[in-house]
Image (cartoon, grey):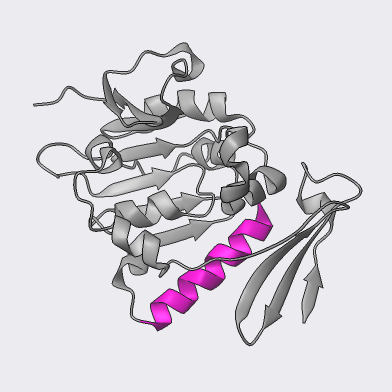
Amino acid sequence: MSIKLGCSLSPQVDANSTVNLKLDYNGLALIYKSKSELMEMKHDFQDNRLQKRTLEKNQALFKACNNRQKSLKTLLDLTAGWGHDSYLLASQGLQVTMLEINPVICLLLQNSLENSRNNQDETTRCLNLINISSLQYLQSRPEKADCIYLDPMFPIHKSSAKAKKPLQFLQSLTRNIDLEQAFELSLQQAGNRVVVKRPAHAEAFNNHQPDIVYQEKTIRFDVYLSKPES
C-alpha cells in the first residue's frame, strides 16, 4: 500500500518531486522521487549505530544538556527531525518532549516509536512526540522544561552529501521557520538552560553569546544558562 502525501506537506519539494509513504509487511517507508533520483528510507530507533551511541557516555551532547549533578529531568526538543538526539538524551534518563512541524516526519517517528515500544525498548517510553511548530508550542505557555534543545538544521557539506541520506530527506521535507522567535522565548521559559547545536565554526545563534560551549570536531553545543551553575 502506498499513501501519496503531495507537495503541500513538503514546502521545499519542487513541482517535479513527489513524497510518498509506503506501508508493507516490512513497515513504513518514506519514498522521495524526482527527475534525477529515487530515495527510500525507513526509520528505526533500534538501529545498531544509534544504539551504540547511547553507550558513549562522554558525548558533548550529554554534557551540554545536563548539569554536573545530573539533576535535570525534563527536556524539550524544539526541532526533533528524526529524533536521534532526543533518543540519545532519553537514554540518559531525561523525559523528552519532541516537537516536529512536518506531518510526514511525524508519521515515521510515531510508527518507529510504537515498533520500539512493542519490542520492549524502555528508552522510547521516555519520549513524547507532538506534531506542532516550536513557536506555536512555546506560545501556548507549556509546563516549564529544565532544558530546551534547538537544532537549526544546517546544510551538508558537498563532499559528504551522498552519505547523509536521512539529512537529505529532512532538508527536502521541512523548513525551520520562526526559530529566532522560538529561541528568544526559550531563553525566557527554560528552567535551567537552552542548548543550541551549531556547526563548529558558525556564529552564535541570533547573536547571543553562550555561557558555556562544548566543542566537537565538526559541531558544537552552545549553552545558555537560565540560572548560575553551582
Nearer to me, 90 or 131? 90
> Left of 133 or right of it: where is 211?
left
Q: Residue at x 37, y 38 (%)?
A: 148
Name the residue at the right extreme.
15
Residue 208 vertical position relative to residue 11 in the rendered view, above or below? above
Location of residue 51 in the rendering, given as x and y in whole percent from the top left corner? 33, 64
Magenta segment, prevailing SS (helix, strand or loop)? helix
Q: Can you tell which quarter of the image residue 126 is in?
A: bottom left
Which residue is found at the position 40% from the left and 77% from the top? 117
Q: Residue at x 33, y 54 (%)?
A: 88
| Residue 10 place in picture, x, y as percent | 76, 49
Front residue of 166/226: it is: 166
Range of magenta residues: 102-119
Could you tell me how many numbered marks the image carries?
Answer: 0
Quadrant where the C terminus sits is top left
The picture places residue 219, in percent across and down from the top left corner, at 40, 31
The residue drawn where x is 55% and y is 25% is 181
Q: Residue 19 lies in what quarter of the image?
A: bottom right
- Residue 38 vertical position relative to residue 81 in the rendered view, above or below: below
Left or right of 112? Residue 55 is left
Of 159 and 169, the residue lying toward us: 159
Q: Is residue 61 above or below residue 82?
A: above
Q: Quadrant of the N terminus?
A: bottom right
**Whole-percent x, y for residue 142 in the image:** 43, 44
Q: Is residue 112 magenta?
A: yes
The single residue placed furthest to the front in the displayed view is: 159
**Residue 99: in magenta span:** no
Can see residue 81?
yes
Whether residue 156 can be seen here: no
